[in-house]
Amino acid sequence: MGVTATIPSGGFGGALASASSKAKAGVRLQNIDALRGFVMVLMLLDHIRETWFVYVPVSDPVDAQTAIPAVALARFAVSLCAPIFVALTGLGVFLFHSTHTLEETTAFLLKRGILLMAIEVFFLSPLYWGITEPTLWLQVIWCIGVCMIVLAALIRLPRSAILVIGAVIVCGHNLLDPIQLKEGDAWLPLWAEIHQRAAFPIFGGGLIVKTTYPILAWIGVIALGYSVGPWFLSDVPAQVRQRRLLTLGMAMLAAFVVLRFLNVYGDKPWHVVEGSPLRTFLAFISMTKYPPSLQFLLPTLGLGALILVLFERLQGSGLVNRLAVFGGAPMFFYLFHLSVLRILYHGALAIWGPNHDGTFGVDSYYWVLVWYVGLIVPLYFPTVWFSQLKKRRRDIAWLKYF
């Protein structure tokens, strides 16, 4: 999740300059937190689907010929979440580094990264363990933790070098797709962590490890997020920042459309579905997330840049204010809502029993949407409370990690 950043004043001294600087910083931070809050709201939809509609499989990429259209469209919307979270993490690291020493930033990244990895292993994975087959899911929290540790090393390089590294990884990692190792290959565990989504046993087969989020492409994303950090410094006019973000966002969307129509690199080929314009469109927007393809990252990061501009222009509105407060406690929300969903699921399973191949689920995606609408507000208020607690109690050091 994101790093809480302290923005440098950028003033020349004096109360007036300081006040002006803090106001500008608030605007810049508000749209970042609002974007984070926005994708948190989207993320909830997918996790509710995985709770009540998990018996309906969703392939990666989504099979446009068989998928329920509403599910496929929702899947594209929630695809914004991981790329934006990781990119904002890189951006937050730059802003933190702008007011802290290299040693302080490195220490924060290492501690934060190790904490996230520990949360994935000791809290989130047990939360989703099967009864008969314990599984260690190395998902997005693990991935962000590893990426932060890698970034702790990268920040010693010039920012231009970090930009080049990020761009090369994001644009070129699909060249490695043909390298597919099989269970039993000695290098599978390492390669699965780097680039290949896979499962393999450890400790004599008593525990299964699943690398849902191989880290290579995400290292590129966090590096790119860090590289655009200077655009958000206090001496950059809002118009300049917005123009850069608009140009970047539109360029990424245009690159996606070109690559998608060429259909030769950056993802699995897509096909026209005869007699169904809707399913053809779904095929066009269904990209590979595990690991994220170039064609997956271009539109999601591009839309993220455009939404940042929108939220900055709407700063001060009720929607942006609420999203910004909501986005101020991303890790708390992540852990809290997943815990609530597991409690609800196991409660329903205990009361009504399995009704879909050993799992409990609703019979229509309509009920997923009903649950989504019904849970947003109950989950919103505890997250806002924790976000405000973080601001009030800066003397409690551990709060900043959530």
Image (tube, rainbow, N blue to C red):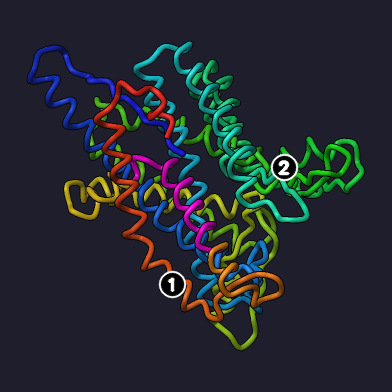
Instruction: Reply yes or no: does residue 193 show up in magenta.
Output: no
On screen, residue 360 above or below 375: below
Residue span colored magenta: 327-345
The numbered disc on residue 195 is 2
Q: Residue at x 36, y 19 (%)?
A: 98
Specify whether residue 363 is in view.
yes
Specify whether residue 246 is in view.
no
Callout in the foreground (2, 1): 1
Q: Amino acid at mark 2?
A: His
Q: Residues within 10 Å of mark 2 (few under 14, many from 20)?
A: many
The numbered disc on residue 234 is none
Q: Residues within 10 Å of mark 1 (few under 14, many from 20)?
A: some
Q: Main secondary structure of the magenta part?
A: helix
Residues at marks 2 and 1 touching, judged by CB atoms closer than 8 Å: no
> x%, y% of residue 44?
45, 58
Which image quarter: residue 33? Answer: top left
Q: Residue at x 62, y 41 (%)?
A: 217
Q: Which residue is mark 1?
A: 369
| Disc with the residue nearer the chain's start (2 vs 1) | 2
Outermost bottom residue = 275
Q: Is residue 244 left or right of residue 24?
A: right
> x%, y% of residue 49?
53, 66
Which image quarter: residue 118? Answer: top right
Query: Of residues 383 and 69, which is closer to you in this image?
Result: 383
Q: Residue at x 64, y 46 (%)?
A: 126
Query: Of residues 330 and 228, which is closer to you in this image?
Result: 330
> x%, y% of residue 142?
61, 38
